[in-house]
Structures are given as C-alpha cells and as structure tokens.
Image (cartoon, rainbow, N blue to C red):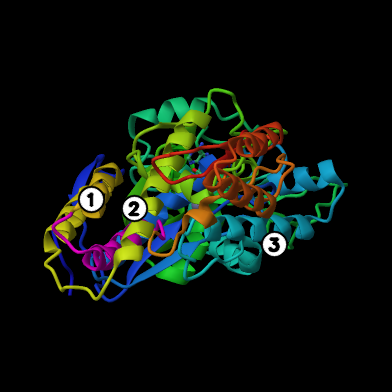
Amino acid sequence: MTHGAPLLLFNSLSRGIETFRPIDPDNVRVYSCGPTVYHYAHIGNLRAYVFTDTLARTLRWKGWPVTHVINITDVGHLTSDADAGDDKMEAAAKRTGQDIWAIARHYTEAFQRNLADLHILPPTHMPLATDHVAEMIAWGEKIAARHCYQLDDGLYFDTTTVPDYGRLAGAADDAAHARIDAVAGKRHPQDFAIWRTTPPGETRQMEWDSPWGRGAPGWHLECSVMSRRYLGASFDIHTGGIDHREIHHPNEIAQNQAYCECGDTGATFWMHNNFLVDRTGKMSKSSGDTLTLQRLIDRGFHPLSYRVMCLQAHYRSELEFSWDNLFAAQVRLKRWAHAVEGLRARAEAPGGADVSGYHAQLDAALSDDLNTPRALPVLDALLADKRLSPADRLEALAMFDAALGLNLTSLTRATLRVRPIEATVDVDTIEARLAERRAARAAKDFARSDAIRDELTAAGVEVMDGDPLGWDWKVAI
Ligand code: AMP
Ligand code: ZN
C-alpha cells in the first residue's frame, strides 16, 4: 500500500521530473556511489548521503520497502578523472607510510560513525570493492572481446561500441572530457580503463592477477559489478554527486550496456545531488584542514545541525557552507528541541485528534522531488498548533522524524549541548556554578551572582539570562 501524492523525482537521464513507479513495489532498489576511503569524508561528501537518506526515507514513507546499497571504494579511484596517475588509496599509503588495508578500515569506520551521527539509516549492504575483484575480472572477460582493447597500461573500454555514450552527461560531456589527460594509445578521449596493469618493476599494495596482467580494477567497473550483484540487472534508482553525472555514471552505463548487450542503462532513475561549496577551499579531502563532521563537533556544533543545514536547501541546489549558516541551522534545531521539551512536559494521553492535514502537507513536500525546504515550515506549524494537544502534536512529530531523520522525539537540549574541544570548562562545573548563582540571586546576593557570572565569562562561558530558547549558557567559540 502506498500513500499520498504520486512521487515526482528529477531524473538526470531525461533532465526532467518524472513520476516514480517501482519495478517491484515490494522491494525498491537504490544504489549510491560510496566514499573513497583514503581520508575522512568532508561534509560535502556527507551531503550526498543526507540526500540519499532523504530519498530512502521518502520511499519508505510512501510504503515501499527499500534495499539500499552504499559501496565502499577501497580500490580503483585515481587522483583525477584521468586514467593516468596514482590510485588515491595507494597515494595515501605512500604519503603516510601506513598499510593500505589499515587505512581503508580506519576511514570506513569513520564514515560509518559519520552516518550514525547524522542519523542516516544504515544501508542494507555496504560492500567493499576489494571483496568483488574476481567478479570485476569476470565482467571484464565477458565484455573484452566486443568492447575493449588492450594498451600497455591496461584494458580500455571503447565508448563507441555502445549506443548513445554520454547521454546522461548531456551537453556537459565534451567539456568534462576535455579535462581528461590523454593516455597514449587511447582510441577516443572518453575511453576509460577497465583494468590498470601495474607498471613493470613496480608493485602495488593492492593488486590482483588478471588476463590483462597483474594490476587493479578501474573505478567505474566496481559500481557496475556491485550494483548488479546486490540489486540485479535493472534496478530503480542510482545516485551520486553531480560530478558523477559527467564521467563516472556515463561509464557505468556503458559497461552495463556492454554486459547485457542491450540499451538498458542499469537503473530507471539516475539522481544527483548538487555540491556543498565553500569559499575558503576547505572542502577538498586532500587539503590539510578538511571540513569534516568532527571539526564541526569540535567547534561546538551538534551533527544534526549540519543535517538541518542540508535539509534547508533543495538537494539539486548548490549549498554554500558558512559558519553563520551552520549556526542558524543549530538555532533552528534548538528551537525545535525547546518546543518539543515543552510539549513533553505538558503531554497527557493523546486525544486522537486528526493530524491528517499535516501528513498531507509533509507528503506533498516530499513528493515534490524531495522538497525538504518546503517540509520544514510544516514542522514549525505543527509544533506551534495550539488547536492540537501536546500529546497529539508529539504523536504527529513521529512521522516527521521518520521522514526527515531529525530525531526530535528523543532529542533534548542537554544532548544538543556540544562542548567545543578548546573549551577549558566542563559542563558539570558550569551547571554547578550556575546553580550557585541562582541560589545567590534568590537570596538577593547580587554581588555574588555577578562574581560568578564574571568568573564564567573569564572561562569563556557566556551566561544567557532570559534566553527565549531557555538556553542558560553557551561556550563562546
Ligand atoms: P568520493 O569519496 O570523492 O568518491 O565522494 C563521495 C560522494 O560525495 C560522491 O557521490 C560525490 O559525488 C559526492 N561529493 C563530492 N564532493 C561533494 C560536495 N562538495 N558536495 C556534495 N557532494 C559531494
Ligand atoms: Zn560509483
């Protein structure tokens, strides 16, 4: 049973809005290109997974069970879109002198913690590329004769052997490929490596034997192999960041078409989130000072503030990162937490009021190509609706949590209080001093109350008397 309005989604293949109809209503299948685990994900990467989580939650909200795959790219992704150069993983191992497998494990676990902190539902499968190399070789063997040619440094895919190569990339196609460095011997600039052989005299930490020599798979191949392996030949939705629309996804499509010897791209919908941009240039994983989720936490932001920031923008719009923008999102989250605490304090048994109007509004927003900026004011309206009892509002809140993943039913203001890493005072000390200050004020000992306030100010704690959100203090950052 599905409910609500038809689900409209933007399909990059047609560059238009289409009505989503599952191939199998009992199992909607979604594949999201996963992170390359040579470094911590930056918050731009994480925007991609807040988007896929909103998508998966919306599909479930509509009543369809979902199988969601996010792969882990632990081999194959080169330092540029070119087929020349180092594997990102190998380069990180060389740079740090660490074991490549340990690097992959460390950053995969860090990524999983990021997902949990952002309240992103765990995907059904999270396959590692390195666990599927034999299947990649088998795929290469199946398509090699008709679609590939061998050069000294590997097996290349001839993109003129499939229909409509680059249809997904559309007009941007030529510009994107103009950026690819030429590899000597390639028949066409857009041809790409299926397999990269290790240069003679070198060894890589990750390499396998293949019919084309010892080496490693090309990055694009892994997603074709793992999506088919976990979701079947033809599944519902393939997602990734907008950068993947130009090269990685057209290459996956070409491989899928070569494998099935048909025109099928592999997925009905190809969806792309736009970028989080940062004028200070801290978004790159390779810059020393990357904007990771942990950096936001270290500065006193709750991770869900970042989720709010993402939801305030439509996934197809560019979103500019700034600390002010994040701060505004955190204030919004605190307002909700404050309102929910107020409701909780006053809640009695639910009155069974009709909240279907809110249900319909939330559904209409999500059905409109996951329009989260439109959904958030509906949440504001629900929390403030005095015609509904506190218990009824709390009950309706659960459906917003299911759809938006903000966890408001269990968030408290106390959990939202994140201590910046540089703060020298701990929360217990602050609370104890503030209790003393309240006692001093009750006893009209204002000199003592002011002294405590000055002492806290000197320690970097701002006391916020009469804050409308009931926030008694914050650590200045
Ligand atoms: P990577 O780890 O580089 O393979 O990227 C993981 C995901 O993040 C991919 O879907 C990328 O398209 C996406 N991505 C990379 N940079 C950004 C960004 N600044 N904003 C949003 N998504 C991004
Ligand atoms: Zn991919």
Q: Tell me if 53 is positioned left or right of 303 in this view.
A: left
Instruction: Give the residue drawn at x 49%, y 31%.
Output: 321
Q: Is mark 3 within 8 Å of ligand 2?
A: no
- Residue at point 39%, 51% (across, down): 338
- C-beta proximity under 8 Å, tags 1 and 3: no
Taking the magenta stretch, the answer to whether it contains residue 393 is yes
Q: CA distance from mark 1 to mark 3?
A: 63 Å
Q: Amino acid at mark 3?
A: Ser
Query: What secondary structure is found at the residue carrying circle 1?
Result: helix
> What residue did someone put label 2 on?
339
Q: Residue 112 falls in which quadrant of the image?
A: bottom right
* Magenta region, residue range: 386-407
Whichever of labels 2 and 1 marks the residue nearer the N terminus, that label is: 2
Q: Amino acid at mark 2?
A: Ala
> Are the residues tagged 2 and 1 within 8 Å (C-beta)?
yes
Q: Residues within 10 Å of mark 2 (few under 14, many from 20)?
A: some
Look at the image and tell me whether residue 239 can be seen: no
Splitting the image into 4 quarters, where does residue 349 fall? bottom left
Q: Nearer the viewer, residue 60 or 425?
A: 425
Q: Which residue is mark 3?
A: 210
405 falls in the magenta region = yes
User: Could you say which is closer to the camera, residue 98 or residue 43?
Assistant: 43
Residue 428 position, x and y percent, is 67, 55
- Report the Cα–Cα distance between label 2 and label 1: 8 Å
- Sequence-wise, which precedes: disc 1 or disc 3? 3
Residue identifier under label 1: 384
Please, what is the three-letter code of the amino acid marked with disc 1?
Ala
Give the x, y percent position of residue 8.
20, 51
